[in-house]
Image: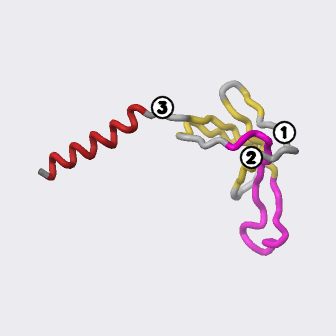
Amino acid sequence: MKLLFAFLLIGTLSGCSIFEKEKTTDNIYLIPEGFEGSITVFYDVPSEPKLKKEGKYTVIPVTELALEALKDTDIYIYGASFTSTPNVSYGVVTEQILLCR
C-alpha cells in the first residue's frame, strides 16, 4: 500500500511539471572590478533606462553604492541597478555571466 501511494505521489508531482512550460532567463551582470557584496536590481523605476539586450542576454549594469547609516559594518557597500524595465517573475535561471568592468 505504501509503495502504491509513493508511485501515485511521484506520478502526480511529475505530471504537473510536464504540462507547465518552464520560463528561463539569461543575464549578464556588469559588476565593478574588485566589488564584493550583495547586488539588488530595482525594476519599474520610471526615470531610469530600460535594460539592454545583447543577443539572448539581458545586460544589467551594476553600480557600487554606499549606505552611510551602515558605515562601520560589512554591508556598508552594496551593488545596485535601477531600471524602468518591468519586474518579471523568472523561472529557472539558465545562465548568469558576471563581468567586471
Q: Is residue 18 shown left or right of residue 83?
A: left
- In the foreground, 19 or 56: 19
**Is residue 37 highlighted in magenta?**
no
Q: Residues within 10 Å of mark 3 (few under 14, many from 20)?
A: few
Residue at mark 1: 49
Q: Is residue 98 shown left or right of residue 2?
A: right
Q: Residues within 10 Å of mark 1 (few under 14, many from 20)?
A: few
Which element carries disc 1, helix, strand or loop? loop
> Could you tell me the amino acid type at mark 3?
Lys
Residue at mark 2: 43
Which comes sooner in the sequence, label 1 or label 2? Answer: 2
User: Is residue 1 something one can see in this rendering?
Assistant: yes
Which element carries disc 2, helix, strand or loop? loop
Which percent across, then down, holds residue 28?
A: 69, 38
Residue at mark 3: 21
- In the foreground, 63 or 100: 63
Alpha carbons under labels 1 and 2: distance apart: 10 Å
The mark lying in front, picked from 1 and 3, is: 3
**Which region shows up in magenta?**
64-87
Which percent across, then down, holds residue 2?
A: 15, 52
> Could you tell me the amino acid type at mark 1?
Pro
> Could you tell me the amino acid type at mark 2?
Tyr
Q: Residues within 10 Å of mark 2 (few under 14, many from 20)?
A: some
Which comes sooner in the sequence, label 3 or label 2? Answer: 3
Which comes sooner in the sequence, label 1 or label 3? Answer: 3
In the figure, residue 24 lies in which quadrant? top right
In the figure, residue 15 lies in which quadrant? top left
